[in-house]
């Protein structure tokens, strides 16, 4: 296998194209592409892009629903030394500032866009037509300087407006190394499965893993994953908690038993009940990952909620003045990795995470019980003021989700008649579950110094695309509901 720490992405592609030319590199909707064919197509597409005017240092916006063509476009942009960003049709219609920043836009449609001086416009049909040109794969040997921008990922926007995070040539090896380290913690050596399209960073990272190891990247959506479940070979996949819960529920309803597979779940804490459901009905091994777009993966979190830092990851716990706190004391999580982004391509939101002196100052609260160990307690902006007590809700919400019949839980602070913070517990129950006795069980998992506590049963709780609870939305909705009574 090529050295994942030093070998660029395209060199890995060339390695396997020569060693195992007919082995499938990627597959989507029953169509597979071999390593040698992929190398030829990437070289042909890169030649087309450069002849169209794409130059090193440009940004390319890619909107393409065909995931195999999208993969070729991403790699072709890398071969051209251009930074690629996967976008949606909605981005093209609503984010004029973003669209104007691209030197090239390649999209599925040729419908008119507002003109931008000097911007190159292509369709994916043109890109696909170029793949038959048969360019020599040796043209992919170009090595770009470490500071070359090759990929742009977008944060979820949970701390304000989404930010654009650059991934430079010198950072790709670090991200790949971390991905492979976490994946190798389970004895699964089958295919890689991407359950999201390339607008999600996980699809790009899984592509890196497939190319580095010479294995196959299979693109699925949730429905096709379930429909073909019985024929799945051993696999490794990344998923968010909400989709993990959906897969576990659907597979359980269909009477499925877990396949030999490794499901890595990131974006939020993994409740024990969900961990058990996944390992019973979806994948034989599961792993909870703490990560960020700015740093790559940070820690592998155990069932006790405490994570082990991955190699190359460093963590500090800071107070509000930025001073380091001792072991075991909670504070603000600051992170650094070998895959660290140097900054943002857009101005960071003052209220959100920021990069300072090579460290990502997050919006997360946590503590380090010992060197190399990290426990995430929740988000800084999620801290609740309850009757004079500060409460980090995430650990208690995780305990609430372990109660019989509880599928989701949220804690929010609402004002009482004297405008003092009062705790409100919101529980979403599985169908047919009786509410009797749950109020008493719920209050037993909470600290005893919180004063009066209210509990309501509700429908599915609102979450972001990355699975994070929309706590402020819940609080505002509750306040509006109370005002209307």
Image (spheres, grey):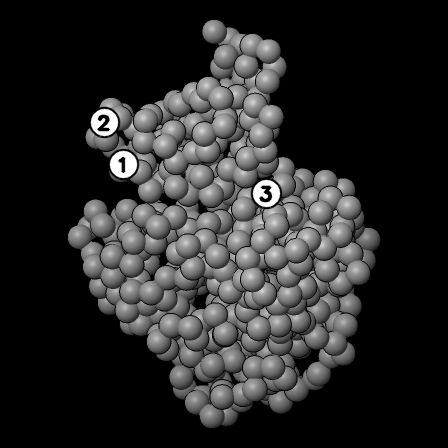
Residue 36: image x %, image y %?
Answer: 49, 85
Quarter occupied by residue 460: top left
Residue 405 circle label: 1
Q: CA distance from mark 3 to mark 1?
A: 26 Å
Looking at the image, which residue is at 38% across and 29% down? 443
Residue 337 showing in the rendered view: yes
Q: x and y percent of residue 33 in the render? A: 43, 76
Above or below — where is 35 with respect to 238? below
Dot 2 falls on a residue whose secondary structure is loop
Residue underneath mark 2:
434
Mark 3 secondary-structure assignment: strand
Of marks 2 and 1, which one's residue comes earlier in the chain?
1
Which of 186/41 is in front?
186
Q: Are marks 2 and 1 in contact (CB under 8 Å)?
A: yes
User: In the picture provided, is 119 more to the left or to the right than 18?
Assistant: right
Residue 145 in the image: state x and y as whole percent: 76, 78
For the residues bearing labels 3 and 2, Cβ distance under 8 angstroms: no
Residue in the foreground of this view, choosing between 384 and 106: 384
**Residue wearing tag 3:** 379
Q: Quarter of the image holding residue 187?
A: bottom left
Q: Is residue 271 above or below residue 457?
A: below
């Amino acid at each position: 296998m090529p050295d994942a720490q030093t070998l660029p992405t395209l060199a890995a592609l060339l390695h396997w194209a020569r060693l195992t030319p007919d082995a499938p590199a990627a597959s989507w909707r029953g169509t597979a592409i071999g390593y040698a064919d992929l190398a030829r197509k990437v070289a042909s597409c890169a030649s087309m892009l450069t002849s169209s005017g794409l130059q090193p240092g440009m940004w390319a916006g890619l909107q393409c629903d065909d995931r195999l063509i999208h993969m070729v476009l991403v790699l072709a942009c890398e071969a051209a030394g251009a930074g690629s960003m996967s976008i949606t049709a909605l981005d093209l219609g609503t984010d004029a500032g973003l669209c104007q920043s691209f030197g090239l836009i390649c999209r599925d449609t040729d419908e008119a866009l507002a003109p931008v001086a000097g911007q190159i416009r292509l369709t994916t049909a043109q890109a696909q037509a170029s793949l038959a040109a048969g360019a020599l794969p040796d043209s992919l040997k170009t090595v770009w300087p470490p500071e070359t921008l090759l990929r742009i990922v977008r944060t979820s926007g949970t701390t304000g407006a989404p930010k654009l995070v650059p991934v430079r040539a010198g950072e790709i090896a670090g991200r790949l190394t971390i991905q492979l380290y976490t994946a190798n913690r389970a004895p699964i050596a089958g295919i890689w499965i991407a359950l999201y399209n390339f607008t999600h960073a996980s699809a790009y990272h899984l592509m890196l893993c497939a190319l580095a190891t010479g294995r196959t990247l299979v693109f699925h959506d949730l429905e096709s994953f379930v429909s073909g479940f019985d024929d799945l070979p051993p696999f490794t996949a990344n998923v968010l908690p909400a989709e993990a819960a959906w897969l576990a529920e659907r597979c359980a309803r269909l009477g499925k038993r877990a396949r030999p597979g490794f499901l890595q779940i990131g974006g939020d804490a993994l409740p024990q009940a969900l961990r058990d459901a996944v390992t019973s009905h979806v994948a034989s091994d599961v792993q909870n990952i703490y990560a960020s777009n700015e740093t790559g993966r940070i820690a592998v979190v155990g069932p006790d909620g405490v994570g082990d830092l991955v190699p190359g990851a460093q963590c500090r716990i800071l107070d509000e003045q930025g001073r380091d706190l001792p072991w075991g004391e909670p504070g603000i999580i600051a992170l650094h990795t070998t895959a660290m982004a140097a900054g943002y391509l857009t101005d960071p939101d003052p209220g959100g995470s920021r990069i300072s002196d090579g460290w990502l100052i997050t919006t997360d609260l946590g503590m380090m019980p010992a060197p190399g160990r990290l426990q995430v307690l929740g988000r800084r902006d999620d801290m609740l003021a309850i009757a004079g007590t500060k409460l980090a809700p995430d650990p208690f919400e995780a305990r609430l989700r372990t109660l019989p019949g509880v599928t989701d839980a949220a804690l929010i602070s609402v004002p009482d008649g004297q405008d003092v913070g009062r705790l409100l517990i919101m529980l979403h129950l599985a169908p047919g579950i009786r509410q009797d006795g749950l109020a008493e069980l719920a209050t037993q998992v909470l600290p005893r110094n919180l004063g009066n506590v209210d509990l309501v049963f509700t429908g599915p709780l609102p979450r972001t695309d990355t699975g994070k609870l929309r706590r402020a939305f819940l609080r505002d909705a509750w306040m509006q509901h109370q005002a209307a009574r």
